[in-house]
Amino acid sequence: MSQICLPLGLDKADISKLEDIVSSTSVKHAGDILIRQGDKFDKIYAVKSGMAKSYRFDKAGTEYIQSFHLPGELFGLDAIYAQRYGFNVEALDTSVLCEMDFNELQTLCSTVPSLQKQLFSLLSRDIYNSHVNPIEHFDQTAEQKLSGFLHNLLSRLQARGHNSLDLHLPMSRRDIANHLGLAPETISRLLKRFQERGVITINNRLVTVQDRAKLEGLVHCHALETSIDISSIAHTA
Amino acid sequence: MSQICLPLGLDKADISKLEDIVSSTSVKHAGDILIRQGDKFDKIYAVKSGMAKSYRFDKAGTEYIQSFHLPGELFGLDAIYAQRYGFNVEALDTSVLCEMDFNELQTLCSTVPSLQKQLFSLLSRDIYNSHVNPIEHFDQTAEQKLSGFLHNLLSRLQARGHNSLDLHLPMSRRDIANHLGLAPETISRLLKRFQERGVITINNRLVTVQDRAKLEGLVHCHALETSIDISSIAHTA
DNA sequence: CGAGAGCTTGAGAATTCTCAAAGTACGTGG
DNA sequence: CCACGTACTTTGAGAATTCTCAAGCTCTCG
């Protein structure tokens, strides 16, 4: 838990208090359901390793894949308000998670101002990302959506210290397609085209970025990309 | 400020403390810029009356309209993390706003647990809405997007006690189109079709819902709609 | 009342989807 | 260890939305 998310800016004593409320650090496997949509909210989760996906079904039974959770990221935060989880979360890979009781965390926040600040900040980041990413996926060509997706994953991994250009994508093409609002066939065709243009190399579910500049070029092509680079802004947490 | 957002669940003394940090309650007019993308974050805002839109420009200069802010709603929360506003916010109408210094609010939260809880809850609600609404706008026909947009506005207004079926849309067709990722022409054509089917009546920027059931039917038609109705869940704030 | 922005309508163009089928990878069981 | 079955992925061709471009109309505001 040390290098992840929440403890940034805390001193040792406070980190120790935080660790007390981590209720478990469990290992999950591909296909394991971590959260069920509609269940009563009690814990928030952090991914230590592996990957998970959040998805929900609407009234018509259509599945929507909302997001993929990478190591170092939190999920379950959207359920604080309703006190019920709004999404199913499923492990895509062998994954290690830690779980924190939110009420205890909230109580702890009252006595540890820097933790309160950090939690506000993390909630805000989720809002920011939710606002910026969807709109940049929105009025775009399929090519921009997919290149943006790959670039986003790469950025998030690199923000956590992964320096490789390899993207292991444990989710199916169908999952990616659903997440981006495209047909699975379109994903196949585009990945192939990206490979032909020398942007990436495909080995089944391993995508290696060959030319990051070209990838970014695809993203920006007609429009797109965050004009404020949030990761470059000094964050006094 | 009394019946809006933040003070829910606070006692009189705490509400008075909260009112102390409301730095101003200003009147703005259509076209006034309330927040500029990139400016240093200091305040969060609540809409008391009127309407505002959040939008941003990407590196290519393309405008994306992220959301419309209705009376009783907060904006600026996405900037806590980066400490800079990520969006421009512009009044669409004559509007009354209140502004709160976030640092003071945060400090107050440390001493008023119910306020802390309420703020966590409101941040979470924004995350929830950002997660659910975009995906329900995503893999959809233009018809579903637009009917979903109208239905969403109606629900939000009614949640604040507006019982009318009139939707005053102070934004242009172009704004709606941009927000939904469609062409303005498509908005025109669809509104016309909705009117022909008896779902709504159009009078320039005033849309009156004639048949709410039909409107919901359009939304659900191929898929869509939240399966957990967040507003019906008892919320112990 | 006039100018300009905003809105509506039409026709053709383009992307992406749908449907169908073949190919490939992986896990299970023999 | 290999064969088979299943699920996933890729490829192709035609269909359908939605977009783009263009022009006419209308509302608002000075």
Image (cartoon, coloured by chain):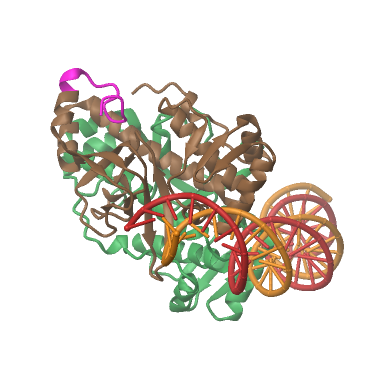
Chain colours: A green, B brown, C orange, D red
Q: Residue at x 49, y 56 (%)?
A: B174
Q: Residue at x 27, y 57 (%)?
A: B36
- Is residue A199 visible in the rendered image? The answer is yes
Seen in the picture, residue B50 relative to C19 is either above or below; the reply is above
Could you tell me residue A56's position as x and y percent? 56, 40
Q: Residue at x 30, y 25 (%)?
A: B3
Seen in the picture, residue D23 relative to A14 is either above or below; the reply is below
Could you tell me residue B223's position as x and y percent? 65, 41
> Which SS does the magenta portion mostly show?
loop
Q: Is residue B111 left or right of residue A152?
A: left
Could you say which quadrant of the image residue B37 lies in? bottom left
- Is residue A25 visible in the rendered image? The answer is no
Q: Residue at x 54, y 34 (%)?
A: A36
Q: Which residues are magenta?
A: B1-14
- Nearer to me, B208 or A34: B208
Could you tell me residue A166's position as x and y percent? 48, 69
Could you say which quadrant of the image residue B48 lies in? top left
Seen in the picture, residue A218 relative to A157 is either above or below; the reply is below
Could you tell me residue B208's position as x and y percent? 55, 35
Q: Is residue D10 left or right of residue A194?
A: right
Q: Is residue B4 left or right of residue A53?
A: left
- Nearer to me, A70 or A184: A184
- Nearer to me, C23 or A76: A76
Could you say which quadrant of the image residue A183 lies in? bottom right
Magenta-drawn stretch contains B236: no
Magenta-drawn stretch contains B13: yes
